[in-house]
Image (cartoon, rainbow, N blue to C red):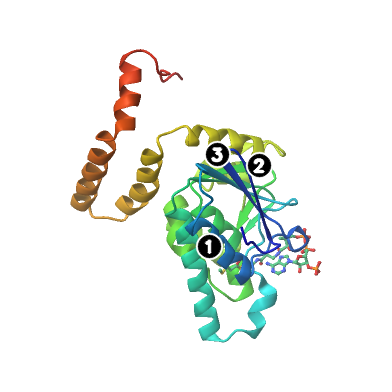
């Protein structure tokens, strides 16, 4: 796989691990990295059923690489933002569920990247901010679309206007991430979650990734119809027949608290 030095990929069987790898710049995201993320998630490695998105160093990502912005005119800024959009759409609407490990700075474009992942695990060190207002810019990586869907428009309004920073516990309570773990435990927890996800039917996971966010954007009638169509396709699959048969024959795990 052809990746820039700012990204490292390896797999552990069915679980892929993709690391942001520019810790000396706090994993600030330049366009090469963003384009490579898009290419990677457009065609994830064959055989991989879930991916853990982690980062080298103490910080997930300090967001947009601000050292590049000085040379941009409006056309460059538009092209860059749309590059981010394509890349993160490839992640969010990809074939493979992605579990992100968040620690240290989850800032600006770093939070936008995290918001495109499907499950987020926050270590206690993680902090979440959108300092765009202070930098004289606006979110450009899909943040105004995705982050309000996680935590509500009023919180994003406040973060952008006042630079408010949420710590990990507060962030998890509000929905920036779904899991809170102690420092150093994020990778292990994410791998555990990825393995659980990988054990699902691939068709169910695909239906969740493709269906859930789109249905959330639809009017009710369209949403119900889309849900019924996806439900019908999954229920008709041989794997569903097998899994449901296993439960009825008492061969499958029960749901326990
Ligand atoms: C960077 C970046 C960056 C660090 N672009 N180079 N994002 C921000 O406004 C966040 C800016 N960064 C920070 O507030 C801090 O760097 C951190 C809190 C993340 C980390 O602090 P610290 O003390 O650990 O590190 P540092 O010394 O500030 O940074 C280490 C190096 O990384 C340093 O470079 P050096 O050559 O002096 O060693 C920093 O300049 C560099 N660095 N962050 C470029 N972001 C699609 S639109 C999205 C819009 C946004 O993302 S806006 C938010 C941008």
On the rendered image, what quadrant is the N terminus found in?
Answer: bottom right
Examine the rendering and report whether any part of residue 109 can be seen.
yes
Q: Which residue is label 1 attached to?
A: 39
Residue sitting at 57 percent across and 46 percent down? 171
- The mark lying in front, picked from 1 and 2, is 1
Q: Is mark 1 within 8 Å of ligand 1?
A: no
Disc with the residue nearer the chain's start (1 vs 2): 1
The dot on residue 123 is 2
Residues 136 and 111: in front is: 111
Q: Secondary structure at mark 3?
A: loop
Label 1 to label 2: alpha-carbon separation: 28 Å
Q: Is 5 situated above or below 134?
A: above
- Report crowding for label 3: few under 14, some 14 to 19, many 20 or more residues within 10 A (C-alpha): some
Callout 1 touching callout 3 (CB < 8 Å)? no
Which quarter holds ligand 1?
bottom right
Examine the rendering and report whether any part of residue 140 can be seen.
no
Q: Which residue is label 3 attached to?
A: 14
The residue at the far top in this view is 250
Q: Secondary structure at mark 2?
A: strand
Residue sitting at 56 percent across and 67 percent down? 35
The residue at the far right in this view is 24
Disc with the residue nearer the chain's start (2 vs 3): 3
Residue 69 percent location from the top left of the image: 64, 78
Quick check: 74 left or right of 209? right
- Report crowding for label 2: few under 14, some 14 to 19, many 20 or more residues within 10 A (C-alpha): many
- The mark lying in front, picked from 2 and 3, is 3
Q: How many marks?
A: 3
Label 2 to label 3: alpha-carbon separation: 24 Å
Residue sitting at 33 percent across and 48 percent down? 211
Residue 215 percent location from the top left of the image: 30, 51
Residue 109 percent location from the top left of the image: 58, 63
């Amino acid at each position: 796989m052809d990746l820039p030095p700012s990204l490292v990929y390896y797999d552990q069987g069915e679980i892929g691990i993709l690391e942001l790898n520019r810790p000396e710049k706090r994993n600030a995201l330049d366009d090469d990295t963003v384009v490579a993320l898009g290419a990677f998630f457009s065609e994830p490695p064959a055989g991989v059923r879930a991916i853990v998105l982690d980062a080298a160093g103490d910080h997930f990502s300090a967001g947009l690489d601000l050292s590049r912005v000085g040379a941009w005119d409006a056309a460059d800024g538009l092209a860059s933002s749309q590059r981010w959009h394509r890349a993160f759409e490839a992640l969010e609407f990809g074939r493979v569920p992605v579990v992100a490990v968040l620690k240290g700075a989850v800032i600006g474009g770093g939070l936008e990247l995290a918001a495109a992942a499907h499950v987020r695990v926050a270590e206690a060190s993680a902090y979440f901010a959108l300092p765009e207002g202070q930098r004289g810019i606006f979110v450009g990586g899909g943040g105004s679309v995705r982050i309000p869907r996680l935590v509500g428009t009023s919180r994003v309004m406040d973060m952008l206007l006042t630079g408010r920073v949420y710590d990990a516990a507060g962030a998890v309570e509000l929905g920036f991430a779904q899991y809170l773990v102690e420092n150093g435990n994020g990778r292990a927890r994410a791998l555990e979650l990825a393995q659980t996800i990988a054990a699902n039917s691939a068709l169910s996971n695909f239906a969740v990734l493709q269906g859930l966010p789109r249905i959330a954007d639809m009017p009710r009638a369209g949403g119900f119809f889309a849900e019924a169509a996806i439900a019908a396709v999954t229920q008709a699959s041989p794997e569903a027949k097998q899994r449901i048969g296993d439960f009825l024959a008492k061969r499958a795990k029960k749901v326990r608290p």
